[in-house]
DNA sequence: TAGATTGTTAATCGATTAACAATC
DNA sequence: TAGATTGTTAATCGATTAACAATC
């Protein structure tokens, strides 16, 4: 296990976890790096190198024990140290994220949401509460909430970001298509749905030619 | 403009487009690579190199004309050659994608959706229709629909993928957390929400130490 | 034991950045 | 003209892959 882990490796780790959980479900108790690599279309040396960042589970001839690998990756991603988050903007995407139960494996617990639209305020099916955006500071400042998820329109994203920072948020997961200005000690992760789409289109066009 | 464009560049192009559209809106008619780089936290040489893949708009001293750059990038992404797509699985995420209007800039038009759940079948607010999954082949085979978006649970994703391939789909944008098996001439782009989350968590943990 | 696998070190490849010439 | 900018070529850096030793 290393202390510095490359960006590329970090981006691949969740896909290992997803594959392993799926394999576990169908009864695979041991799996080799070669098998994982073939299934994900990666190089087997790369898989081994990536896995060595999160786990020491490998055994020559046997491969990796699925269970151990899953729990090591979860531990690496923060499963034992789940961070609380709030989401701002609970329209389509925001509501989807708030309802999604799979983030716990990745160390994220979305505790509640905020919106400016009165009609969205209340309690969702999954018991998660939506508050008015005006209550953000009161609810978040001084709490143990350290991550803010922005799923608003781009027009209000910077304002929401400022409120989150004021309330003590240290990490922002930004789904709005805008670049946010934040103080140096706040980390922003921009999520852009269209990036993958650009790759797909380009690869499809190349094949046509 | 080059013929081969690196994966990293392709992934950045949508963020240039988003920034330019936003700048245009606030009245910026000319913009330099240095400014773009500063706003997105990138190197200015890299920005110039990336933009040279999609455009020839740059003028020394002046910079890039925002309008020209926007339309060149849109053209590059396929705005004049919009591809039709269908989406399978119109629960939370699927419905969000179907309702999202911003994909046209990226050359994607989602024409309608499919679901197995009878209660979701009908017409959405945006006039887009949802059909039963059993109608997939009849609707898609022989049509001009070339992209399938999978937003189902992982349990049914491979089956849906097989149906899409059978119906003549050549590109799959996969939001299910599973690796799909497809023939060689079909391109799969896997989208994994958790990848960005892994990066954010890791960077936050590194700062704490 | 032989063979399949892990894990590491060295070589290659690709992407980023630095230096510089060209242009308006 | 001088200076800000573009765009390209060369150097650096980081990530991937190949080769190989270690292990069960």
Image (cartoon, coloured by chain):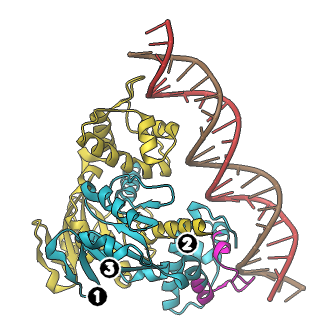
Chain colours: A yellow, B cyan, C red, D brown
Chain letter of mark 1 equals B
Query: Which is in the foreground here, disc 2 or disc 1?
Result: 1
Q: Do the residues labelled 3 and 1 touch (CB within 8 Å)?
A: no
Distance, label 2 to label 3, CA atoms, is 27 Å
Q: Which contiguous range is marked in magenta?
A: B50-71
Name the quadrant of the C terminus of chain A.
Answer: bottom right
Q: Which residue is drawn at 37% across and 59% down?
A: B192
Q: Does the magenta stretch include residue A58?
A: no
Label whose residue precedes the other's in the sequence (2 or 3):
2
Chain letter of mark 3 equals B
Name the quadrant of the N terminus of chain A.
Answer: top left
- Residue D20 position (above or below residue A37): above
Determine whether, in the image, residue A89 is placed left or right of residue B193: left
Q: Mark 1 highlights which residue?
A: B126
Label whose residue precedes the other's in the sequence (3 or 1):
3
Distance, label 3 to label 1, CA atoms, is 11 Å
Q: Are marks 2 and 1 in contact (CB under 8 Å)?
A: no
Determine whether, in the image, residue B137 is placed left or right of residue A200: left
Q: Residue at x 27, y 73 (%)?
A: B135
Q: Residue B13 carries which label?
A: 2
Q: Mark 3 highlights which residue?
A: B112
């Amino acid at each position: 296990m290393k202390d510095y882990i490359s960006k590329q490796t970090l981006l691949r780790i969740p896909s290992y976890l997803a594959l392993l959980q799926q394999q576990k479900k169908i009864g695979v108790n041991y799996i080799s790096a070669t098998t994982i690599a073939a299934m994900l279309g990666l190089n087997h040396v790369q898989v081994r190198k990536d896995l060595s960042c999160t786990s020491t589970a490998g055994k020559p001839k046997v491969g990796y024990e699925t269970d151990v690998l899953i729990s090591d990756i979860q531990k690496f991603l923060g499963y034992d140290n789940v961070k609380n988050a709030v989401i701002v903007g609970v329209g389509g995407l925001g509501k989807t994220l708030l309802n999604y139960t799979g983030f716990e494996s990745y160390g994220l617990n979305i505790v509640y949401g905020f919106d400016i639209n009165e009609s969205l305020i209340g309690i969702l099916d999954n018991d998660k509460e939506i508050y008015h955006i005006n209550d953000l500071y009161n609810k978040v400042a001084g709490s143990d909430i350290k991550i803010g998820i922005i799923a608003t329109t781009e027009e209000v994203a910077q304002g929401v970001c400022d409120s989150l920072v004021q309330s003590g948020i240290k990490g922002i997961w930004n789904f709005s298509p805008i670049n946010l200005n934040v103080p140096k000690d706040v980390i922003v992760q921009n999520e852009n749905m269209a990036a993958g789409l650009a790759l797909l289109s380009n690869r499809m066009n190349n094949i046509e030619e």
